[in-house]
Image (cartoon, coloured by chain):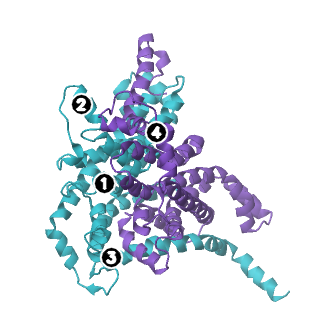
Chain colours: A purple, B cyan
Amino acid sequence: MFPKPIQQRSRAAQVAYQSLLPLALVLWLLPLIAVMVFSIRPFADFTQGNYWGVPSSFELFTNYGRVFFESDMPRYLMNSVLITVPTVLGAVALSCMTGFALGIYRFRGNLLIFFMFIAGNFVPFQILMVPVRDLTVGMGLYDTKLGLVLFHIAFQTGFCTLFMRNFIRALPYELIEAARVEGVAEWRIFWFVVLPLMRPAIAALSVLIFTFIWNDYFWALVLTQGPDAQPVTAGITSFNSQFVAQYHLMSAGSIVAAIPPVAIFFLMQRHFIAGLTLGAVK
Amino acid sequence: MSMAGTDQTWLRRNRMTVTPLLFLLPGVLFFVVYVITPIFQSFGISFYRWDGLGEATYVGLANYEELLTDRNFEVSLWNNVKWLALYLLAIPAGLFIALFLNQTVAGIRLYKSLFFFPFVLSQVVVGLVFSWFYLPREGLLNAILQALGLGTVNILGDPDLATYGIIAAGLWPQTAYCMILYLTGLNAVDPEQVEAGRLDGAKGWKMLWFVILPQLRPATFIAFVVTIIGALRSFDLISVMTNGGPFGSTRVLSFYMFEKALGEYGFRMGYGSAIAVVLFLIMLVFIGYFLWQMWRDERDARRG
């Protein structure tokens, strides 16, 4: 193990390390802690210039209550859910299939198609912006959740295929050969042999894609414009213009917007990190 | 045997070609329609003058000629260079934190997740959090600077500082990402090699450089890929924190393109596409390099 385990060092070093840990964490999360403190302050604190002293009262429920009951925030959150969940389902379903095709079969153009997915996954969004917007407007899907979902599914398929294909490549190929010898049809091999083994990959990808899509801002700006379809990342801008300079409410609003992916991360941490670090180890 | 029977045998005979084709079809279709084709279409649009609604007029290379004398384009391009160079700091910073946290003391798992968790926040939230952190009057940064007896700064209001302030905000989640890559990599470091290194008298920096880092190469490669992509994709933070200002000093190509094509200064789709093409070509250099590396790995894996 590197660096040398702290247990093998002097008592003083251990104490220093143990006290440095929380200190470093507080420093690291300082901007976020500041926002959390803002979000429970009363408005009076800001008018009196009491930004960093002890809050004159704790307004946790008042502030967060106003976010939920006096703004469009719930609608934006709902839109985010209705955009994110179908995208996750769609992208994972498509990439299970593409990953299976590219990971199991040998045919001409296999590597070419695989590299097309990888390369496409890296391109800057701006090179897609005008044509994708045009296409979406043309299909009558501008400012709809469906328009956003279709694009997200397509784009995420690139990353998901890379992920799934590499995962399937690492599965024991003998299993598939054994099934073929038994005369099992190819689609049944996919459904009954490969798919059950892909469960960890599916879980990891779902959590990752959920976070990516929930946090998308650019495409929300390009393809939607009002509270009917806008997800919370874009909605927060109009929320902030509703509560200009009321930092206690704006802080509460952005914390609310951030909670779903944070909750998913803490609940599904193992899968999340497994997905993110695939390929970091050989 | 009936017709269905011969059909079945044809299918059965060719199943190793037909199956992957059918499985690929929906994914490839989606990807070609929404990702591959638009790239070429953008190249096409960049030769036109077009407001996105009316008739497009072919103008040849006029958009690109205009770029050459566009001062804002120059500023954006230069800011992209700054982003690229400074964003790479996330890699050593991430490695440093990973080394710091790679211990087995009580509660270390929670520490690791809390250090990682800025990465899970959306860039919009990160942007808001940091713009409030930087606020001249209400911000915590200035409160601390004052407590230390230093003067106050208005980072996002100063054309010379604003870009660096935004990059710092971007480095926060990006460092967390690199950290988690390295933590996973460190987990897989071969203990025997570390022991062998110790016996040879390697310690500290030497051990890190000659024994550990070579084993972390896959993690470093991925950290490099995601950091470069992240730097060139920077848009959300700029849009949220300064909206390109003050005086356009924080624009980057991705932001300038959006401003030209969909922003309040009118719908110049052709000119915007020309900017996007330039950004794409810059990215293509890196994409080419990444693909070449991955292709080499694939080839080695096949031989091995």
Closest to the camera, between mark 2 and mark 4, is 2
Subunit bearing disc 4: B
| Residue placed under numbered mark 4 in the picture | B116
Let me know if residue B195 appears in the view: yes
Q: Earlier in the sequence, mark 4 or mark 3?
A: 3
Q: Residue furthest top?
A: A11
| Residue placed under numbered mark 3 in the picture | B43
Please, what is the three-letter code of the amino acid marked with disc 3?
Phe
Please, what is the three-letter code of the amino acid marked with disc 2?
Leu
Please, what is the three-letter code of the amino acid marked with disc 1?
Ile
The crowd level at tag 4 (other Cα within 10 Å; few <14, some 14-19, many 20+) is many
| Residue placed under numbered mark 1 in the picture | B238
Subunit bearing disc 2: B
Q: Earlier in the sequence, mark 2 or mark 1?
A: 2
Q: Are marks 2 and 4 on the same chain?
A: yes
Q: Are marks 4 and 1 on the same chain?
A: yes
Q: Is residue B33 left or right of residue A221?
A: right
Q: Are marks 4 and 3 on the same chain?
A: yes
